[in-house]
Amino acid sequence: MSAPPSNGNRGGAERPVVVCEEVSKFYGEVLGVNRVTLTIPPGITSLVGPNGSGKTTLMNLMTGLIHPDRGSIQVRGISPREPERMMRITGYATQFDAAPRWATGFQFVSTSLELFGLPRAEAESRAWKALERVSLTDAAHRKVAGYSKGMRQRVRLAQAIAHDPEVLVLDEPLNGLDPLVRAETIALFRQWGAEGRHVILSSHVLQEVDVISDQVILIANGMIVAEGEIRGVREEISEHPSQYIIRCRDASRIASLLFSEDHITEIKLNDDRLGMLVMTRSREEFSRALGRIALDGHVIDGVIPADENVDALYEYLIGGGR
Amino acid sequence: MTLQFRMRQAWTIARIEMRRAFFSRRALWVYLLALFPAVIFIGHGIEMTYRHKRWSGQGTTPAAALDSVNPRDTAEEVLKKAGKPITDRDWRRRKLTEEEETEKGGRIRRYEMVEGRMMMYYDGRRSVRLFFEDGVLKDKSIREEMNFDQDRQAYAGVFQYFYLRLAIFFGCLGIFMNLFRGEMLDKTLHYWFLAPARRDVLLAGKYLAGLTASTVIFTGGAMLSFAGMLWPHESAAVAAYWSGPGMGHLFWYAASAALACVGYGSVFLAAGLLLRNPIIPAAVLLVWESINGFLPDLLQKLSVLYYVQSLCPVPAPADPGMPPLLRTLLSPATPAAKEWAVLGVLAVTVLVLWAAAGAVRRIEINYSTE
Amino acid sequence: MAVYKRGYQRYQGPLTGRFARLMAMPRFAWERLLQQRLVVIMLCLSMLWPLLCMGFVYLANHLDLIPGMGGGLEKMVSINAKFFVVFMNIQAIFTVILAAMAGPGLIAPDLANNALPLYFSRPMTRVDYVLARMMVLAGLLSMVTWAPGVVLFTMQSSMAGWGWFTGNWRLGAGLVAGFLLWILVVSLVAMASSAYVKWRIIAGALVLGFFFILAGVAEMVNAVFRVDWGSLLNPSRSMYHIWCRLLGAELPEGPGTWEYASAIAALVVLLLVVLERKLRPVEVIK
């Protein structure tokens, strides 16, 4: 589909971005989001936060379904107040479960494509392709109102991707999908992210977010708690010791060597004595200490960071309230 | 984006919405409202034709003989003047003869038994019912069975009191409210907002769909009723009517029905956008339009009904159910000139749609408050 | 191990009676209704006419306060069956508007949110549910119908004396009975509308439309067929006739009391059938 060339960088830099500047939204006296300033580069970005933290509000703001009380938003250089231009490059699969009663899955997708100005034959061909991508062709001619929750999720996804958007916003897109479709959908997101499109999604399944996201935005109480690549965010958190799992044959000896280091705060030996969990206040010093131990002839089979994931970030930054 | 593209987009939106407006189950009651008068007129036509055949078969009485029957004639005298009636029934009933108030404020009523009798005659056009009490004619009720003028008057009344005040009012309420407020209640409005279309183009498309549906349904219903009113009458009378004012009457009835859809449609579309519960203003508007005739001239002109009634070719008879006291207060304003009436409704519509366009640009998706 | 063997004991304290349980729903509904500004405004507006009528009653019993008006005034302000029928007619308009405002919120949200199975999983039958919902409207509408009517009647009785009361007790009884019948009809219309359409707004329009459109249909039938039985299709007209009969006022022309009463009875049955069909303790997915 011929979308107008778009570039969201205000400074004229090359990569198009989604920019929120000091965005605030209140529902009466209830806070939606407060002074959110963000720059989202292309790739897969996950919005993570507890219920009511403002994820959906932020997505609705980005797509113009609601308007900010303060601040401004630009999606690849286009304001959401210009739906005529912006929705050409944007697809949004909302969390609202309702669907028009009159439409079959196929009509639902194809009629939305007709609003792009596509001839009917082209709209129908694209609708069919989109339904194929979400494995919904079998039920394409059934009324959406009679679909199961997972099918409705898929048809919304099909509608969001049917016009081949540059920016795809997805509110809990993996909810209700069976494992096979889930895997295919994740592969699709990855492909789109790799092509330089924006895939902005929210999810409660932190393991999945961890696997698919290029960057995360942690949001709580309507405010951005952290944003960026997971590892970068983790490095910024100094008040929580970093955790590493070490696999080795001489665990007791290595543990005693590590304990002599000042930056080590805690070590838990595995029951099998073939590994341990180490907590350190300094990644650099820990790295140097491991190097020294290895040079002394101790065999270390592997070192894995135990808390460089969204789960841990969530725990540290937002707490266990999820 | 060119104007042409936007117009095409508005038409696409209208096409999608029209399917809903015409063919959804929710639209059934709108058809019912629009077609009910046609059913009544057709039913009346069938009844008239059937009665005419049946009564004519039993023998008609000359009109002069029936006219010569006077009050206080006895049953025998009537039988002598008019011959054997089509129907002859008698009964006995209790009749209140006296009522007096007691000292304590109560009442005493006295009754007596009377012999009642009813004879019915038919002269080919009129049915005459003669009511006797104790053998003396008390009441003579004449009913025009095949009266073209009366039927046209009845149609004028039905069109103005039923179509304009009720059917089109409530039909437009249902159709146009459904366009935005209905989608908010169904939680599906956001799908429209996620289309690459300006919000005012969306408004134009939806309004066009509502207008097409309501105009086709109600103008069609009014035309069908008109045809239902005409068909039982003698073809010569109908042909004379068509060659005279008939075509003009039909045109102006259709025009005022369409214009009512234009006016009420815009008001209800805007109400659905601007207000969370549009029933209250709808009730206020209904009351306003209902008491329209009792208001001063200037206020009467601030209603859709004033303008669309000005287009009606035949003035409606006074509401027969209206209490006499209210009837004295009724003072309809002088109807507006037809061109001013059309311009008036169009001007109000443009103004209301302009306000609605502002509202639709500001509107946000927040279903939880519905 | 079974739960009870691990020491589970269900609640064995005192339970409230059926009526108290039934009243739980109206209690909350009234509270919610009276928080709505528009309902309160409408309630206040609907008290204006009773207040005016009280002024009439006072005037009628104190004609000496306006000297020189003669018998004309006495005739104009006489407190009789016609006076009470007019009072009932005006108040009936307010009941329809109040029912259109308060009625749709009674059942429609429960149906839209599939809440009926939740209600019926409590010790509550469908009849209880309907009664409880009807009580909400009955309570609200009583405030503007028979309650001020009884006050008016009592005021007149106390001013006119025992003699007037004994001679006219039928007016008071007829007023209460007539209003109760009207409340039943209006409540059933509001509840059936609320059960028939899931949208509150449309249900409100349906309540208004029901009375206005049926009145229009009745007039249309009368005008086109040149008959008077079309009035049987108009519940307001039927009720007006029944009120006149109950209060002993002059009966309007047209069908008789039995015909009107039968029309109202048929309407009540029809509305009950709608409620019976729509209020199912199961979720129906189409």
Image (cartoon, coloured by chain):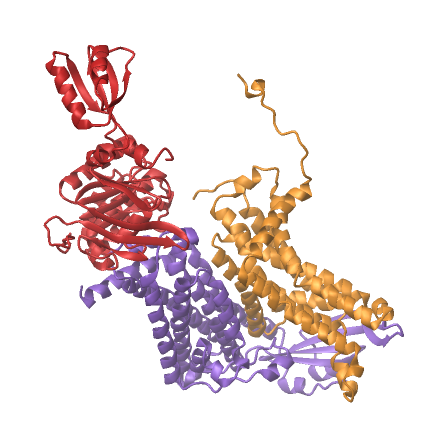
Chain colours: A red, B purple, C orange
Q: Nearer the viewer, residue B153 or B144?
A: B153
Residue A170 placement (x, y as % from top left): 27, 44
Quarter of the rendering occupied by the C terminus of chain B: bottom left
Q: Nearer the viewer, residue A254 or B244?
A: A254
Count how many numbered circles sit on residues in the image: 0
Q: Nearer the viewer, residue A294 or A1?
A: A294
Residue B330 placement (x, y as % from top left): 57, 83
Regarding residue C184, the answer to whether it shows in the image is yes
Residue C37 placement (x, y as % from top left): 54, 61
Residue A277 placement (x, y as % from top left): 26, 19
Residue at figure coordinates x 62%, y 49% from the top left:
C27
Residue C233 placement: quadrant? bottom right
Residue at figure coordinates x 14%, y 44% from the top left:
A196
Quarter of the rendering occupied by the N terminus of chain B: bottom left
Q: Nearer the viewer, residue C53 or B79?
A: C53
Which residue is situated farthest in the bottom direction here? C68
